[in-house]
Structure formats: structure tokens, C-alpha cells
Amino acid sequence: MAGPDYGALGATFKSVRVLQVISLISIIGMTANFISEMVNSNKTPPQVLIGTLSVTCIAVLYCVITYILFLDNSLPFLIHLAMDGLLLIALVVVAVVIGKPLSYLNCQVIGSTSAFDSAYDYTAALGSGLDKSGTSVVYTDWIAATKTTCLEMKAIWGLSIALW
């Protein structure tokens, strides 16, 4: 079941789809982990994370369906082109919304000894705001709370940019 033979373009389509699915599943895993941790702490996750998870789940479904249709030689290329364009727009929106506050953030200084006083004050203020059960997590405050969170969100941002 090799699918239709479209030469180098067909092989490129297949390999790019596989790489897209791998990137999207990575984004889904990291985002779902963040949402799970917040929900388990009785916090409402930011809409940015929920939107990212929704768009990437739809994108994985779309990639799998178009890959199967390509293998069956029943993929209408013009419709596929239009749908790829819409998916591209959705992924650009995800990358821009996630990356807007992340682009100004230097993850390496979070938790370092040179910025300990301001980071301590910042996380103490963040923690006191999250002590209430059922409160909503503010995305811009949350990404700057720990170095690990910052780096993982930058990984999600980078993978969503790579999908362009």
C-alpha cells in the first residue's frame, strides 16, 4: 500500500505529513499536560492553552485523513489546497497568540541567582494569586513563573512556527 506514484512530490507530501503529525502530537502532549496540572489544582486553564489544544487536535485529524485519502488516490488537490491554507491560518494565529508574551521572555534568567530577589517577589505574588480554588490562571504570569514552564512553552511556540 504505497499509494499513488507522484514522484518526488508524492514522497515529499508523505514525509512532510509524518513530520507534521509528530510535531502536532508533541504540542498536544505538552499542552494537555499543562492543562491537566491546572485542572487537578482546581484552576481554570488560560484560553490560549485551550485554543492551542483544540487547533492542534483538529490539525492532527486533518493530517491523518488527508494522508489516508492520498494513499487511496482520492484526494482532490484543489480542495486540499484550500483546507491547507485554512489550517495554516489557524496555526499562524496559535503561534502569534502563544508567542506574543514569550518573545520578550528570557527563560535563562528565571530562577537564576542574579535575579533572585525580583523572581522571588514575582513568584510569591503569583502564588498568592493562585491560592484561591477555582481561580483562572493568567497566561502571561504563568509562563514566567518557572524556567521549565517557560522552556516548554517556547518549545510549543517553536513547533507551531515550524509547522508553517
Image: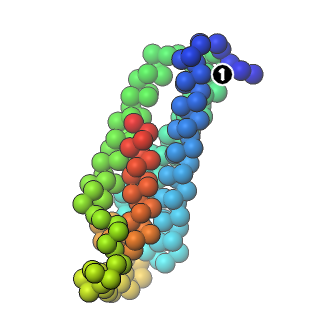
Instruction: Please state the horizontal and vertical placement of residue 144, each as a whole percent of the image.
Output: 33, 70
| Residue at x 35%, y 36% (from the top left corner) | 89
Q: Which residue is mark 1?
A: 71
Rendered-image quadrant of the N terminus: top right
Q: Is residue 76 above or below residue 140?
A: above
Asked if residue 122 can be seen in this view, the reply is no
Quarter occupied by residue 47: bottom left
Q: Quadrant of the C terminus?
A: top left
13 sits to left or right of 124: right
The amino acid pointed to by label 1 is: Leu
The residue under the point 34% across, 41% down is: 92
Looking at this rendering, what residue extends furthest in the front direction? 114
Where is residue 22? Give x, y as percent: 57, 44
**Local secondary structure at mark 1:** helix
Is the residue marked by circle 1 packed among few (<14), some (14-19), or many (20+) residues within 10 Å?
some
**Left or right: where does residue 145 sit relative to residue 23?**
left
Residue beneath the point at 55% across and 38% down: 19
**Quarter assignment of residue 115:** bottom left
113 versus 83 height, above or below: below
- Residue 7 position, x and y percent, is 59, 13
Along the line of sight, the residue nearer the viewer: 42 or 24: 24
